[in-house]
Amino acid sequence: MKQATGISIARAIVFVLALGIGGSAAAQAGSYPARPMKIIVPYPPGGQGDTLGRIVGKKMSEMLGQQVLVENHPGAGGTLGVDLAAKAPADGYTLGLGDSGTLGVAPSLYAKLPYDPLRDLSPVSSVAMITAALAVNPNVPANTVRELIELARAKKGSLTYGAGYGSMSNLAMELLKSMAGVSITHISYKGFAPQLVAVLSGEISMTIGDYSAMAPHVKAGKLRVLAVTSNRRSPAAPQYPTLAEAGIEGYAADFWFGLLVPKATPADVVSKLNSTVVGALKAPDVSQIFDNRGYIATGGTPEEFTATIRAEINKYARVVKEANIKLQ
């Protein structure tokens, strides 16, 4: 009898403790966020990704009532910062900003990538795309994509393009070459700024990259844009066709960004972050800033962002293999 009573008391203690722990966890989830948060941006200050992270982070701060700080951790093509985000505590207080390169291309590009975008991270929401365009030096005798393809076929290997090795510009051009069936020689540059200078000077024939950086040179007549790389026309440059419209059917190379958290982050926290990010993107002041900078807001559910990452990994795995691009 005493033994049964002892067991009953023990069970009661366990039950009360369980209630306390569960109630405490629920209270924590309900009061989230209770302290400042941070977004790890895997790029240097001043670039497109850094600017985007700060715009969204500021609006999230206003909406959540907690400061959202931006920490820059550049290196290894952006993979260093994404890895730090993946290995952060899974409590919702550390987010990582990733992009088409670090999430879609990197798994096939790096022999020893320290993270798996889908196994080690939980997508929160896609955030935005930048307008990327195919541009040629004005001395290149091609005013349309079809004319450029004909020229590349007639002068096999003599046309050149500039891009950082393994960058999205590199992969976007290799995808173009593969789908159009042309040979264009790759000249490697360390970043978009030097490759833009090279195409302006005529050192190379063409490049793919950020349209907002190209626009002043296009206006000055020093650069000719033939098409945008996205799967639909850009609101920032609606006068240009997509590469698919211009003659390369099915082509799309989106330069996108999105927010993620460590994989074990509670589902209710991910849900709250998603609604906050999507709400931030719909805010009139954010929309105005995006329009001024040529960003295209995306948003969407965690499931939609997950599907995007998976599709991009599969697409660029084929491009990387065919072009034999590999980084250590």
Image (cartoon, helix red, strand yellow):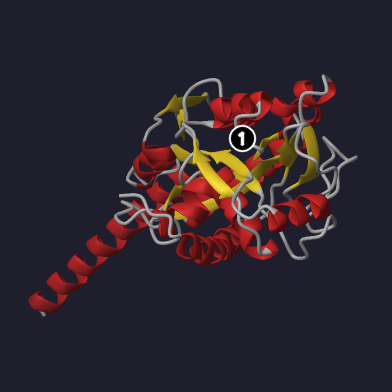
213, above or below 272, in the image: above
Task: Please tell me which residue is depicted at 61% across the width and 24% down the height of the picture.
Answer: 197
Residue 156: percent from left, percent from top: 63, 55
Quadrant of the drawing holding the N terminus: bottom left
Task: Count neighbours of disc 1 (C-alpha within 10 A) and say few if under 14, some if 14 to 19, many if 20 or more.
Answer: many
Task: Please tell me which residue is depicted at 60% across the width and 30% down the height of the picture.
Answer: 203
Residue 156 in view in this figure? yes
Residue 278: percent from left, percent from top: 69, 44
Q: Nearer the viewer, residue 213 or 274?
A: 213
Task: Please tell me which residue is depicted at 23% across the width and 61% down the height of the picture.
Answer: 13
Q: Which of 267 and 178 is in front in this view?
A: 178
**Amino acid type at mark 1:** Ile
Q: Name the residue under label 1.
A: 204
Residue 14: percent from left, percent from top: 24, 63
Q: Which of 257 and 259 is in front in this view?
A: 257
Quadrant of the image occupied by residue 111: bottom left
